Image (tube, coloured by chain):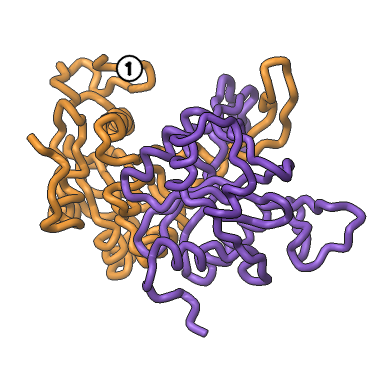
Chain colours: A purple, B orange
Amino acid sequence: MLYPNNIQKKQKGIISYSNRGMALEGLLNETNEYYAEKDVALIFKKPTPIGISEAVYTPKGRVIKNGYFKAPSTLDYNGVYKGKYIEFEAKECQSKTSFPLSNFHEHQISYIRKVLKHGAICFIIIKMNSLVYLLKGEDFVDFLDQHSRKSIPYSYLCEKGYVLKEGYQPALPYLDVVDKIYLKGAYSWQRN
Amino acid sequence: MLYPNNIQKKQKGIISYSNRGMALEGLLNETNEYYAEKDVALIFKKPTPIGISEAVYTPKGRVIKNGYFKAPSTLDYNGVYKGKYIEFEAKECQSKTSFPLSNFHEHQISYIRKVLKHGAICFIIIKMNSLVYLLKGEDFVDFLDQHSRKSIPYSYLCEKGYVLKEGYQPALPYLDVVDKIYLKGAYSWQRN
């Protein structure tokens, strides 16, 4: 089950060890499935928001004949972990030097500010230079408030971000980092 | 703005006072918008999950030419309130005597059990006999565990449910009840 159908194998021509070649979304979907199965958390990718301008009834049910994709105004993933509300976005960054802020819609950025005010655990997962970082929403917003740049330099990610180690099961255990940085001192869900 | 486009006016022929004629979903959308605007909570209806079997590129962007509706496996609304994860479903019930459990898909019911285990605030809002009730997920699941009936009698809803008073702004202040029954003793968001 190394490369399920919906997972793109990247880095063609390079021998891929464990998950190293798997796209970020695939890693996160696998991880979230694992967390749900093992009763760790219920966190899912939200359905893509679409608008429907034409739908018809068929013997198999209602079918969309004309639909369009709406710009998302919230983040991609949300759910519950230990009673807390979690929401995050995942992005792969091709540039090696900086993460372009054009990865976000303007209303997504104001949404991040709001959801933080409401006490959510909110962060961004960024894959860059072959590593996966978790950047707290608070540090993301701080950067925006203190700079007028159109991208976040890699050095900021290295300084403020937390590296997520890719593993076998789960593929990308980001809740370990959530435990450490948000729920300090809380028991870990791992009972080893 | 009594009847926005997407709100069905019900009870034709009957004079409608305040929100009384508005469909439940309309009331909840108005309420959630109000809560978001007033910085009370961020709770939204999830996009309808759809599958896409054909999409084409047009000058205006990618357009869906063949799509189908997937059965929902979670509940309709979720979000964050005072750092807590909230998820709920809203149903209008035409029967005056009982609420059919066929209103839920089987995997939605197992989802309710799971999300409760993870510490979520989870409930069902049911409009029945012209009143709007909030039924805690715990009481919903208790009923299922203790009965093999295919519907919940109205008497159970009267006994276990909490009546939500329809108001002007917000139209259906369900977080007042959440404060009372889940966050006992917590300060109310209303500062009068």
Residue A134 location, quadrant: bottom right
Residue B102 in sight from this viewpoint: no
x, y (%) of residue B6?
A: 38, 21
Q: Is residue A40 above or below residue B93?
A: below
**Vertical comparison of B32 with B186: above or below:** above
Residue at the farthest right position:
A13
Q: Is residue B118 left or right of residue B35?
A: right
| In the rendered image, the vertical position of residue B117 relative to residue B181, given as above or below | below
Q: Is residue A12 left or right of residue B153?
A: right
Q: Residue at x 14, y 30 (%)?
A: B167
Which residue position holds label 1? B4
Q: Chain of mark 1?
A: B
Q: Residue furthest bottom?
A: A192
Closer to the camera in the image, A4 or A177? A177
Q: Residue furthest left?
A: B192
Residue B92 visible in the shown view: yes
Q: Quadrant of residue B108?
A: bottom left
Q: How many marks?
A: 1
The residue that appears at 57% across and 43% down in the rendered structure is B70
List x then y, in percent, for residue B119: 33, 63
